[in-house]
Image (spheres, helix red, strand yellow):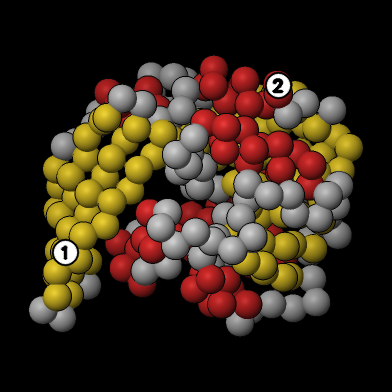
Amino acid sequence: MSPKKNEWFYNWFNSPFYHKLYVERDENEAKEFVQNLFYHLNIKEGSKILDVACGRGRHAIYMNKLGCKVEGIDYSDNNINEAKKLENDKLHFHLHDMRKVFKEESFDYAFNFFTSFGYFENDSENQDTINAITKALKQEGILVLDFLNPYKVIKELESEEVKIIDGTAFKIQKHLEGENLIKKIEFDSEEKKYCFEEKLTVLRRIKFLEYFRNANLMPLETLGDYALSPYDQDSSDRMIFICKKL
């Protein structure tokens, strides 16, 4: 499916400034999270893995180095073009809309990392995404979905901050509009002004459980951080779901 270029996330995720702003999402963090998941889930060499919203492939690349056959899908052609430079016979990347099914009943595991969910205008599209990922899994396949902890985010919301990264000052303003977290990002680069906006639906745990039930997924556990500590609504940084396809 061709991306719709009027959707805000297409332009922002395709921008080099997106990767500059989120440079702190480093390789060590990705490796540690993946290592913890592989141990926790007892993932074997040769397992087939789908990385949904893979970005430039940092998680997929490491999972492949651990001996798995990995395919990554992403909505950003710039991301996929970068990721493709590192492909091999057991690592492939595809431009694909995660709302649509990719290779039905082909994967042992599907991962959706780092709040790569909740960007769509309509709630039905969130359900479509969960349905599509589930259809890509084999019977009894495992989905890991990593989302922010909405309760903590709302409680500790900072309305404004400035991040200076490699000489670029990113002014970030956040506010809630109903169930949506709006993040306005303004900065100057090479004497040109830029302004991007992120819009994320702050989905609660009960809503995810509804999506999973509708997709015939059984939640196994909810974890609260990349060390895989138990989830606590008030204090956890993340809300990481592990589900099995029935």
Q: Position of residue 49 (x, y in %)?
A: 75, 54
Closest to the observer: 110 or 177?
Answer: 177
Residue at image point 74% right, 78% down: 88
Apparent side of residue 40 relative to residue 161 in the rendered image (left or right): right
Asked which quadrant contains residue 215, the reply is: top right
Which secondary structure lies at badge 1? strand
For mark 1, what is the residue?
A: 187
The answer to whether residue 179 is visible is: yes
Quadrant of the rendered image containing residue 51: bottom right
Label 2: how many Cα within 10 Å (few below 14, some 14–19, many 20+): few
Q: Which residue is located at x 45 percent, y 43 percent?
A: 119
SS for callout 2: helix
Badge 1, how many Cα within 10 Å: few under 14, some, many 20+?
some
In the picture provided, is 206 more to the left or to the right than 62? left
Q: Earlier in the sequence, mark 1 or mark 2?
A: 1
Query: Residue 78, position in %: x, y?
Result: 49, 73
Q: Amino acid at mark 2?
A: Arg
| Mark 2 lies on residue | 213
Q: Is residue 177 above or below residue 89?
A: above
Residue 127 position within the rendered picture, expressed as x and y whole percent measured from the top left: 62, 33
Q: Residue at x 75, y 54 (%)?
A: 102
In-image side of 45 versus 30 (left or right): right
The C terminus is located in which quarter? top right
69 or 78: which is nearer to us? 78
